[in-house]
Amino acid sequence: MHFDLVDLRLYLNVVQAGNITAGASLSHLSLPAASARIRAMEASLGVAFLHRSRRGVSPTPAGQALAHHTRLLLQHVEHMNHDLAEYALGFKGRIRLLCNTSALTEYLPELLADFVRQHPTISVDQQELTSLRITHALRQDAADIGVISNAVDTRDLQTRPFRDDPLVLVVPLGHPLANRPDLSFSDTLSHDYVGLSASSALAVYLEEQALHVGVRMQVRIRAEGFDGVLRMVARGAGLGVVPKATIERWQAPRTFKVVNLCEPWADRKLLLCARSFEQLPAYAVALLEALSL
């Protein structure tokens, strides 16, 4: 079997037009040349692809299968041409990146800064959302790449490991819970909290975990960012939950205790996620590879 792209495009044009004359015209071929190509395709497999009648042509079952695979093949060819054109034009594009709070604040700033410096014609639109909302957006093709926790369902998406990102409890010195080496989240919910802004993905996530055990978090004050949470906890304003990476990055004296949370959801991992890594445009693949290092 030997079909070239001219044969396949001609065949689709003939099927869509319903006759060989119109299909030949759409393909910029003469009628004799188009007819000869169709007959050669059928002869190569010994099967008819078209029913011929006075009113035109229609695909046989084999012809329907050929049309289906031809559409998929030509779509891949278009993707290939698009991606190669991006290389030729200097890799231009705008990437839609969705990420949870921890990824956005702890891991991505330096990585994204290096990426846009190395690719001056690529822009990155980043937005903070909960991991669940990120997966919904990816399924609806409203984003290119997401950075999510492993706590959400990704069965119909593709993922790659990004970072280990355990969450820990921070407790003011002298607090009743300060001398406990390990705590469950429910043990803490009778105490006041310093929270992130109400729209923060992690704030929404923690409040959902509290509701799962039938209790509301007592958030007395909210801070902008994890550093703000730590500074307020250190001054005795309440408990806080932050990524372990925030503690490791903290430069000031630790005037607070760090306590492990005995919860499966706290021992989380971050994942890079997309509908299909193979179908991402070339400029998005470049970011994916940069984040996968």
Image (tube, helix red, strand yellow):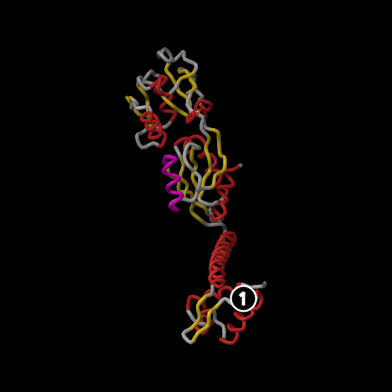
234 vs 76, nearest the viewer: 76
Query: Residue 87 location, x and y as percent?
Result: 59, 59
Q: Residue at x 53, y 35 (%)?
A: 269
What main secondary structure does the magenta stretch of the protein show? Answer: helix
Identify the residue position indicated by label 1 in the image.
Answer: 47
Q: Is residue 152 above or below residue 231?
A: below
Which region shows up in magenta?
128-141
Residue 146 magenta: no
From the top left corner, tell me how far across and down residue 53 is, in percent: 50, 84
Residue 231 drawn at (x, y percent) = 42, 23
Residue nearer the viewer, 210 or 282:
210
Side of 207 where 252 appears, left or right? right
Q: Residues within 10 Å of mark 1 (few under 14, many from 20)?
A: few
Q: Secondary structure at mark 1?
A: loop
Q: Quadrant of residue 65?
A: bottom right
In terms of depth relative to the viewer, which is nearer, 5 or 242? Answer: 5
Q: Quadrant of the N terminus?
A: bottom right
Q: On screen, 151 above or below 262?
A: below
